[in-house]
Image: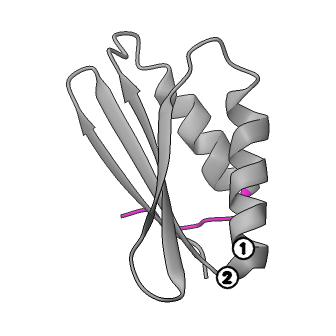
Amino acid sequence: MIDAQFRSEERYSKLSIAYEGKQEGELVCSTIENIISKYQIQPETYTCNISDSKDVLVIEYHDDISREAGPIFEEILKKLDIKQCD
């Protein structure tokens, strides 16, 4: 099951997407790569292991004065069919 968490402060936005297994990982990574490549503003991304079977891909936008990350995050959530984001 793919889970998402969103955090935001002034000029900073972060979306963390937790996934389990190789198949979910490939889906999450390819979806995010395809979506962010369409936009001029580029995030910092990194992956963390949170358990033996679960990893998290983190997408961070710094100095996002115009709040351009919001629509990008919404597109990612919609494409991954994530209905709830904490």
Q: Is residue 30 left or right of residue 70?
A: right
Q: CA distance from mark 1 to mark 2?
A: 6 Å
Given the image, on which type of amino acid does mark 1 rest? Glu
- In the image, which disc is placed on residue 24? 1
The answer to whether the residues at label 1 and label 2 have Cβ atoms under 8 Å apart is yes
Image location (x, y in percent) of residue 77: 62, 53
**Relative to residue 55, is residue 23 drawn left or right?**
right
Q: Amino acid at mark 2?
A: Gly
Circle 1 crowding by C-alpha within 10 Å: few under 14, some 14–19, many from 20: some
Quarter of the picture holding the N terminus: bottom right
Along the viewing direction, whichever of 80 and 44 lies nearer the viewer: 44
Of residues 78 and 29, which is closer to you in this image? 29
Magenta residue span:
80-86
Q: Position of residue 72 (x, y in %)?
A: 60, 33
Q: Residues within 10 Å of mark 2 (few under 14, many from 20)?
A: few
Q: Position of residue 9 (x, y in %)?
A: 20, 32
Secondary structure beneath dot 1 equals: helix
Residue occupied by mark 2: 21
